[in-house]
Image (spheres, rainbow, N blue to C red):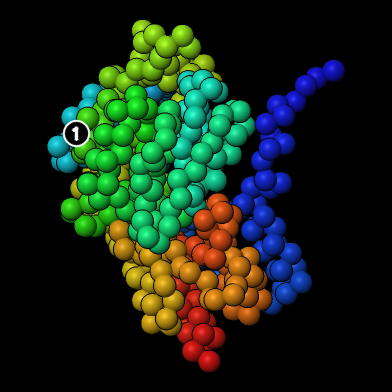
Amino acid sequence: MVYINDNFNKLAESYLFAEIADKRTQYQKAHPQAKLISLGIGDVTQPLCPAVVQAMQQAVQEMGAAETFRGYGPYEGYDFLINAILQNDYAPRGVQLNASEIFVSDGSKSDSGNIGDIFSAANVVAVSDPVYPVYIDTNIMAGRQVRTLPCTETTGFCPEPPDWHADLICLCSPNNPTGAVFSKEQLTAWVNYAREHQAIILYDAAYKAFITDPSLPQSIYEIPGAQECAIEFCSFSKTAGFTGTRCAWTVVPQALRGQNPDGTAAETSLNALWFRRQSTKFNGVPYIVQRGAAAIYTPEGQAQVKQVINHYLQNAKIIRDTLLGLGFSCTGGENSPYIWLKTPAGQTSWQFFDLLLNELNIIGTPGSGFGQQGEGYFRLTAFGSLQDTQEAAERLKRYFQK
């Protein structure tokens, strides 16, 4: 008899976005002529920028010649990409890291789920509610106790440190799904909490490129003491269109330590544990993809990626301004590609989903799919094309101005 991991039976029946995709497919089959506009799943629509494509093409040529062919690459990533990340994403913000603390990967979703491999199942995990489902689901799969941090309008949809102990803390800024962004003061409170409780913050900064307000932190390491208590996840997916190409990185500072089951300090650093995990279960991101990612940091790449980010921020502004003009209450859409709106009185999140789908042919994401506190809210994304975003805005105006 083979025993299954019974923790999977504690999960919701299906992953949120798989359920939405199924509803979309069923509706499209029943209404083949309907033009659906997706403002739901956070996938990008703009193509890879020319600098990235050119770099990848050059890398393909290199792979086709014996003298420049490469097989297995370094588990933690090639130096040319790691150094570009250090010089462009951290040094300008006064953050000093070293190359051994950067691990290139195939996605921040993968890393934020896989990071649990280096932590005991006995750890208590704190997650905000509402929350990106991966944080909860992967910890439930591992058998950890998950406690939620109510994330409501009164807190600006940013979780606050609790009056109870957590070992691992999942934070996301700009937040998915609420679009809220931590201030330095708010992050400082979390860093202080983590250091006091000897906890580790798992900080998802996948959307940091959308932060345009210079007073807001893009990295948790801008907060003094964070390198002693935080792991940071970053991604090229939403900032440079790598959702299908797959490239990201995770920062695990050398200073991070955990405890042994008997409470004594662990001799091995979390950095070393993560390297051991990656070198066992992961063979690295392809050279071609890493060359493309590095091209983002060239002067041409920086200018081209900025245009893409501005495109999505323009979409976010259109959606946000439209909703506010129609009397909706919403957050996000500024420094974030996500808009978090309160559903009309008396409508649940899924009822509002059905209304938008059936009456306006617009697809969004029900807030209840992100947690109990998400009921009565709804998420829209700015990752569509400008034309689709403008058309969706017009559909919203025609229907809700009746």
What residue lies at 48% left-to-right and 69% top-to-bottom?
Answer: 342
Judge by depth and name the residue closer to the eye, 85 or 344. Answer: 344
Q: Position of residue 344 (x, y in %)?
A: 53, 76
What amino acid type should be assigned to the residue bearing mark 1?
Pro
Rendered location of residue 72, percent (x, y): 46, 20
Residue pointed to by mark 1: 224
Give percent across and percent down for residue 131: 49, 49
Q: Check the image and report above or below for 282 versus 61.
A: above
Q: Within the image, what quadrant is residue 226 found in?
A: top left
Residue 364 position within the rendered picture, expressed as x and y whole percent measured from the top left: 55, 65
Q: Residue at x 51, y 20 (%)?
A: 120
The answer to whether residue 247 of the structure is visible from this angle is: no
Judged from this view, the residue extending furthest toward the right is 1
- Which residue is rendered at x = 55% and y = 46% of the image? 133
Compared across the picture, whether 27 is left or right of 132 comes to right
Residue nearer the viewer, 126 or 252: 126
Locate the N terminus and report the quarter of the image it occupies. Answer: top right
Estimate how packed mark 1 is, as few (under 14), some (14 to 19) or many (20 or more) residues with alpha carbons within 10 Å.
few
**Which residue is nearer to you in this view: 344 or 99?**
344
Residue depicted at 42% across the width and 72% down the height: 329
Rendered view: 157 above or below 53: below
